[in-house]
Amino acid sequence: FSFILIFFNGLILNYAIVDISGKQEKVFLGSFVKTNYLKTDSDGCIRFPILMLVNDSKIEYGKATERKSVVAQKLKDLKGKKIVLQKYKNKTGYKKRQGHRQSLSLWKITDIPNFADSKSKASGVKTSGA
């Protein structure tokens, strides 16, 4: 779901690299992301911190993105693919079989901060051009 073409009719879309439970994900506005199960607020929204923000060939990272975050809406909770674990010891008759399904959450990215908003809020913060 989250792999969308960057170039669409000659326009560059903005995207962000966010930190979700210690993993980095590339997200676009309106894209869907599967993560390990995460609890949410009462409204079902959560904020993921931005590591890098790209908009119209401009790149922000480091201190410029410290206080920025992407807002995501929880769509539903899922279960992952079943994993079967088998243990066997030769000549002893020991056999053990276990199964596991990881709990997952499906998120829709609803808001990514704009560069115009970020320049006015973060006064004196440098942004690097690509």
Image: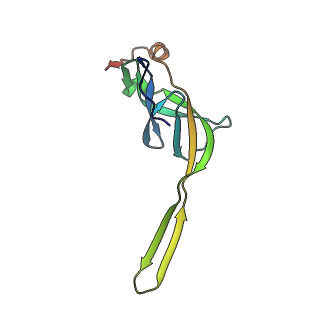
Q: Residue furthest front?
A: 9
| Viewport quadrant of the C terminus | top left
Q: Is residue 58 left or right of residue 39?
A: left
Instruction: Judge whether 76 appears above or below 108 on screen.
Output: below
Query: What colouring method underlies this structural image?
Result: rainbow
Residue at 68% over, 37% down:
42
Q: Quadrant of residue 55?
A: top left
Instruction: Judge whether 26 appears above or below 12 on screen.
Output: below
Q: Residue furthest right?
A: 42
Q: Is residue 118 left or right of residue 42?
A: left
Q: Is residue 62 left or right of residue 69?
A: left
Instruction: Judge whether 77 appears above or below 12 on screen.
Output: below
Residue at 53% over, 68% down:
98
Residue 34 location in percent, x, y?
A: 52, 42
Residue 88 location in percent, x, y?
A: 43, 77
34 or 21: nearer the viewer: 34
Q: Residue furthest left?
A: 130
Instruction: Judge whether 61 appears above or below 36 on screen.
Output: above
Residue 45 location in percent, x, y?
A: 61, 34
40 or 32: nearer the viewer: 32
Q: How many numbered marks, from 0 up? A: 0
Residue at 41% over, 80% down:
89
Residue 70 location in percent, x, y?
A: 52, 29
